[in-house]
Image: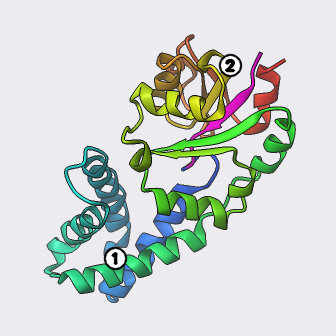
Amino acid sequence: MIRAVLFDLDDTLIDHDAAIRGAALSLFDKVIPDGKHEFKVFIEQWISLNREWYKKFFAKQVTFQESGRGKLREAFSKYGCRFSNRDADTLLSEYWEYYVSKCQRFDDVGECFAQLQKCKIGVVTNGQEAQQVEKLRRCGILSVMDVVVTSEAAGFAKPAPQIFQLACAKLGVQETESIYVGDNLELDAIAARDAGLIGVWLNRLHGDLEASPRIVKRINRLTELSELML
């Protein structure tokens, strides 16, 4: 019997990709106001650097603030820009506020939660505690959660099995009684399955069906989740 459903946050419950692209464009326009011919290249580079510096943060090689400064300086170094810590922190604060303001939950989230009223619900996310919790709050999701586990607070980052197991322990359920849903096949669905949960790949982009192994379930929308629980 399924007693708990856990979710990834970014690009599963909220549209992180659209928000980060909009925030990156705003940042670039502020620093390089006459560089619109470069903004598409910058956005893709920013997204790539965001992943790389978050990995360093997850590995405890840098602090969260250092990861932000690092990606900012690296992203703008090709344009000859140099930032003091104070200037970098100001730009990052403005970027963060713009990013959060653009974070919107997907249109299937509310109906999905309504279908899961008999289950405990939670989030397991790689990220900084205050940042991820604030995104949940602003998107009107935090009040629904029975548990929120971030990699910073847990001391483990996905795909480590401990972060999934910690969430189950906090909810008072067994891993075998729990489902984990995420948009990343390896980091979410397969990692959760390896931790003892039922892994579900949320394939919003309708990617290659052959890429979905039999050891995990696959859905295209969150509202399809209830069908897996019958």
At horizontal 71% and vertical 39% (from top left) the residue drawn is 121
Is 151 contained in the magenta span? Answer: no
Q: Mark 2 is on which residue type?
A: Glu
Mark drawn on residue 37: 1
Q: What is the C-alpha distance between the residues marked 2 and 1?
A: 52 Å
At horizontal 43% and vertical 48% (from top left) the residue drawn is 153
Is 8 contained in the magenta span? Answer: yes
Question: Looking at the image, is mark 2 or mark 1 nearer the viewer?
Answer: 2
Disc 2, SS:
helix
CB under 8 Å between discs 2 and 1: no
Mark drawn on residue 207: none
Q: Is residue 33 left or right of residue 227?
A: left
Q: Is residue 175 left or right of residue 84?
A: right
Q: Mark 1 is on which residue type?
A: His
Q: Position of residue 30 (x, y in %)?
A: 37, 86
Q: Position of residue 119 (x, y in %)?
A: 79, 32
Q: Is residue 59 left or right of residue 181?
A: left
Q: Position of residue 10 (x, y in %)?
A: 54, 50
At horizontal 85% and vertical 38% (from top left) the residue drawn is 117
Viewer-closest of 206 and 70: 70
Residue 36 visible to an observer of this rendering: no
Q: Is residue 101 left or right of residue 106?
A: left
Q: Quadrant of residue 136?
A: bottom right
Q: Position of residue 32 (x, y in %)?
A: 30, 85
Q: Which image quarter holds the N terminus?
A: top right
Residue 222 visible to an observer of this rendering: yes
Viewer-closest of 183 and 33: 183
Whether residue 220 is situated above or below residue 28 in the rendered picture: above
Q: Which residues are magenta?
A: 1-9
At horizontal 68% and vertical 63% (from top left) the residue drawn is 139
Where is mark 2, residue-wise? 177
Tell me the crowding category of disc 1: few under 14, some 14 to 19, or many 20 or more residues within 10 angstroms, Cα based: few
